[in-house]
Amino acid sequence: EAANLADVGANLKRARVVAEVPSPIEGLVTERLLVMTFSEGMSLKSREALLAAGIDLHLLVGRVCEAWAVQLLRDGVFNADPHAGNLLVRQDEAVGPLPVLLDFGLCKRLSAEARLRFCQLVHALSEQDGDLLLESLLGLGMKLN
């Protein structure tokens, strides 16, 4: 998990994605122990609480989507457990809503070919192209009866 945190954090920073990933603390990570930096933020469970805190929900959703798109489609190292419990948000004076991405215990690493096929799949869905969708799914190894 420490390697996943470091890889995804560095990748998002290099891509200039507005998001925070806690960093493992060198010398305090073993096979059984992970100590990382503390990241403040509020839960995404209550829309009303987020709005009361001044969170721009549209911008927040865009930033979370960008973070996962960069992980999955560009870098191929991504958190394979994306749910609201693994996300926090903090209102940052400089950038507005800052997504905090947590829990990188379940990460996947994709080959360049798989990343291309996922890009193809997203494009096929956006264009409503059934033939391209089928091609991308088959290219990802899906077996159809």
Image (spheres, helix red, strand yellow):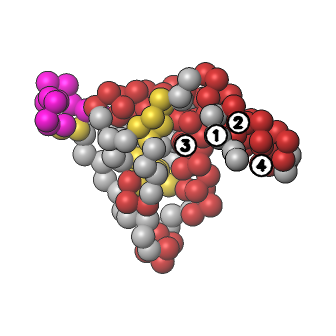
Instruction: Look at 54% across and 42% down and name the residue there.
Output: 67
| Quadrant of the image occupied by residue 29 | top left
Identified by mark 1, the residue type is Met
From the top left corner, tell me how far across and down residue 62 is, in percent.
61, 52
Residue occupied by mark 1: 142
Viewer-nearest residue: 74 or 131: 131
Which of discs 1 and 3 lies nearer the camera? The answer is 1
Point out the tag, 4 or 2, that comes first from the N-terminus.
4
Viewer-nearest residue: 143 or 112: 143
Other residues around mark 2 within 10 Å, as few (<14) / some (14–19) / many (≥20):
few
Point out the tag, 1 or 3, that comes first from the N-terminus.
3
Residue occupied by mark 2: 138
Dots 2, 1 in contact, CB < 8 A: yes
Q: Secondary structure at mark 4?
A: helix
Q: Secondary structure at mark 3?
A: helix
Magenta region, residue range: 23-34
Q: CA distance from mark 4 to mark 2?
A: 15 Å
From the top left corner, tell me how far across and down residue 127 is, in percent.
85, 47
Which of discs 3 and 2 lies nearer the camera? The answer is 2
Q: CA distance from mark 3 to mark 2?
A: 23 Å
Residue occupied by mark 4: 125
